[in-house]
Amino acid sequence: MDIPALTQRFWDQGYLVIEDFFDAALMAELDRLIVAHFGEDPAFRHEREFLDKAQTQVIPWFPQNEGPCAFDAVDAIPELRALTESILGAGWQRDYSMVMFSKRGTSGQAWHQDCPPDDPDVFNLNRLVYTSDITDAIGGQTVVVPGSHRRGIVPVGDPLGRFGDQVVLRPRAGTLVLLHGHTWHRVLPIEGRYRFSTNYRAKSPSAPDHVTDVCVYRNMRYRFSTASVIEERA
Ligand SMILES: O=C(O)CCC(=O)C(=O)O
Ligand SMILES: [Fe+2]
């Protein structure tokens, strides 16, 4: 792994895709645990207001909050730590991990920034792990706008609209996707069956705790800890 080159590409593009990063046996184990946890038709947990207004139909699970578990193995991978340190610098900190599950027939995730872009130095690094293939037949492709981590706040507009310069990612089992928290991104509708990703968040040394508590959508800023819209955008 050429860490300096990958770091450079990350800072150019605001995201990075590395295929076959994770061990296949670890991916299979985590995938099995996730499917067992959710089952085929889990109930939504976010407030109705969030699900409708954010047009983000996901069900979260925080596996590492329940004690030591197989998910800890990802945090310990030396190459992931080295790449994270190269991007964020010494003093970076890990944040929580979360599985985001989307049911078949749901809208995916609207365009958003994981944290407000008000200060370019304050951001989270989203380290996304895919334990099974995301395909066009299933849907749920991840979409990013390259370089948008430098373009400030995602413009007001259609939460699910298309950007001319968007790039569609189809991560496979074992792919690592790194996303800058200011990069504009979304997830396409889920057609074929359920779809999920697991994110291990880390943050820049100057970012406060809970840097991802406020998420920026094209129609609002939303605070998860209080389940409230803190700014309408129009
Ligand atoms: O599931 C994905 O591909 C993207 C998830 C996402 O937007 C996030 O974890 O913040
Ligand atoms: Fe996100």
Image (cartoon, rainbow, N blue to C red):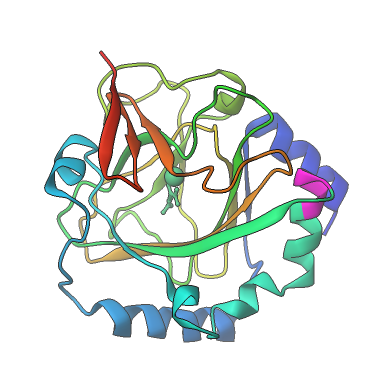
In the rendered image, the residue lying farthest to the front is: 226
Question: Is residue 31 depicted above or below 95 in this figure?
Answer: below
How far from the left and from the top, in percent, is residue 89? Answer: 82, 46
Left or right: where 43 falls relative to 212: left
Location of residue 27 with respect to 182 vertically, above or below: below
**Residue at (18%, 71%) from the top-left corner?**
42
Which sits in the foreground, 102 or 1? 102
Q: In which quarter of the image is the C terminus?
A: top left
Q: What residue appears at the point 20 percent right and 62 percent down from the top-left corner?
A: 103
The answer to whether residue 33 of the structure is visible from this angle is: yes
Residue at left offset 21%, top offset 61%: 45
Give the left or right position of residue 233, taking residue 90 as reference. left
Answer whether residue 53 is magenta in the image: no
Q: In this view, does 94 lie to the left or right of 1?
A: left
Q: Write down the region rendered in magenta.
A: 85-89
The residue at the point 43 percent across, 66 percent down is 133
Residue 137, above or below 47? below
All told, the count of numbered labels is: 0
Q: Position of residue 167 (x, y in %)?
A: 48, 35
Answer with the quarter of the image where residue 71 lies: bottom right
Q: In this view, does 166 lie above or below 191?
A: above
> Is 163 left, or right, of 44 in this rendering?
right
Residue 129 visible? The answer is no
Instruction: State whether the magenta stretch is mostly helix, strand or loop.
Output: helix
